[in-house]
Image: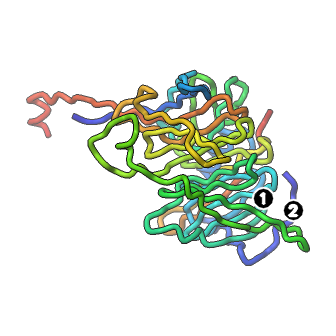
């Protein structure tokens, strides 16, 4: 990682106090111990929203895109370099996933109801990177899974949850709808090419497909699964008397 | 009747059926590391204790992570402080080959 002096700018945030740092020593120690390597660089943020994981890295331009409060913020490896409103995307339309798509050269920002693309541009005079256009992908929208191959009695809207792409699978993305359906979307037409309900993938009604991640080569898809099993608890007469 | 939750990672081949390739059981403390983890198929990656059979996370630390600098660094987003004094921080850790 290229070392550059951290300079003050309009986006600089204060590091935590000594007391705060000391109280967090255990956590930092745990991370360093598990990774077997010390931390080399830190960027302090203005909020604690990083805990929701709404950020991703673009190695081509060596920047990080993160969502904090009502803003999208762009960082290099030392400091914040730009910010913009996260878009007039509607009531309760929270961001759910941020992903750098290398073959499109854009960030994909998934909201509960819509997908947006966010491009970057370089200032020709200063060569600094800035945000460019935030555009909605109109063909990607939420729908009820009553139209799915899996018939459901309910009519709930299935929110857009996660997406993933891979440099090795150019022209496609995988999309997670409502923790219950995976779709392969063509990024040229922005149309769904194929889809699988969680039942197609041998999961049960109570199971949830969470974060999805394509391997770098694009040959396999890793899916975090929450498998919710019914546990029958038999209370004996003695237990009921005690409680 | 109650529900008990199991967390695991399924690796599925990119094909017509998303064929199940492998199922990796996650320990309870590992859930916080699930987001955006690129899972290697070999056992050489030691930085976050990932193998093809087991994922053992950094215990009791709520972090979000992704690779940076062409897989030479791990970028971890976590929260420092407590109560009203919480603050997010990005930290770069160099990966050991």
Residue tagged 2: A4
Q: Nearer the viewer, residue A169 or A179?
A: A169
Answer with left or right where residue A161 lies relative to residue A123.
Answer: left
Answer with left or right where residue A31 lies relative to residue B26.
Answer: right
The quadrant in which residue A91 appears is bottom left
**Numbered disc total:** 2
Seen in the picture, residue A147 relative to A116 is either above or below; the reply is above
x 56%, y 63%: residue:
A48
Chain of the residue under the numbered disc 2 shown in the image? A
Q: What's the coloring here?
A: rainbow
Label 2: element kind: loop
Q: Nearer the viewer, residue A33 or A47?
A: A47
Q: Residues within 10 Å of mark 2 (few under 14, many from 20)?
A: few
Answer with left or right where residue A199 lies relative to residue A58.
Answer: left
| Residue A101 in view | yes
Chain of the residue under the numbered disc 1 shown in the image? A
x 69%, y 33%: residue:
A218
Residue B2 location (% of width, % of height): 25, 36
Label 1: element kind: loop
x 44%, y 43%: residue:
A179
Asked if both marks, 1 and 2, belong to the same chain, the answer given is yes
| Residue A24 in view | no
Residue A114 location (% of width, % of height): 52, 58
Which comes before the other along the chain, label 1 or label 2?
2
x 60%, y 26%: residue:
B15
1 and 2 marks in contact (CB < 8 Å): yes
Real-space CA distance between mark 1 and mark 2, rounded to the nearest whole angstrom: 9 Å
Residue tagged 1: A77
Residue B87 location (% of width, % of height): 58, 64
Residue A185 location (% of width, % of height): 59, 42
The quadrant in which residue A239 appears is top left
């Amino acid at each position: 990682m290229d070392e550059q002096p951290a300079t003050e700018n309009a986006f600089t945030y204060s590091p935590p106090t000594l007391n705060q740092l000391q109280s967090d020593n255990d956590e930092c120690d745990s991370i360093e111990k598990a990774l077997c390597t010390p931390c080399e660089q830190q960027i302090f943020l203005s909020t604690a929203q990083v805990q929701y994981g709404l950020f991703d890295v673009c190695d081509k331009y060596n920047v990080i895109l993160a969502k904090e409060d009502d803003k999208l913020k762009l960082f290099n490896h030392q400091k914040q370099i730009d910010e913009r409103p996260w878009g007039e995307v509607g009531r309760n339309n929270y961001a759910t996933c941020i992903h750098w798509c290398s073959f499109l050269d854009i960030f994909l920002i998934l909201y509960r109801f819509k997908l947006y693309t966010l491009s970057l541009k370089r200032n020709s005079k200063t060569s600094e990177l800035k945000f460019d256009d935030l555009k909605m992908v109109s063909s990607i929208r939420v729908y009820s899974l009553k139209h799915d191959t899996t018939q459901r009695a309910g009519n709930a809207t299935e929110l857009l949850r996660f997406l993933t792409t891979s440099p090795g699978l150019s022209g496609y993305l995988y999309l997670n709808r409502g923790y219950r359906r995976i779709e392969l979307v063509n990024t040229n037409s922005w149309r769904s090419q194929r889809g699988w309900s969680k039942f197609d993938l041998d999961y049960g009604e109570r199971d949830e497909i969470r974060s999805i991640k394509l391997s770098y080569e694009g040959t396999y898809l890793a899916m975090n699964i929450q498998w919710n099993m019914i546990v029958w608890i038999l209370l004996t007469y003695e237990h009921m008397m005690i409680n | 009747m109650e529900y008990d939750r199991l967390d695991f990672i399924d690796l599925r081949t990119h094909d017509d059926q998303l064929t199940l390739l492998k199922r990796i059981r996650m320990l309870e403390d590992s859930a916080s590391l699930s987001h955006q983890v690129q899972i290697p198929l070999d056992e050489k990656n030691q930085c976050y204790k990932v193998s093809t059979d087991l994922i053992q996370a950094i215990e009791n630390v709520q972090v979000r992570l992704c690779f940076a600098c062409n897989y030479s660094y791990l970028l971890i987003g976590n929260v420092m402080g407590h109560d009203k004094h919480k603050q997010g921080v990005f930290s770069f850790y160099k990966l050991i080959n």
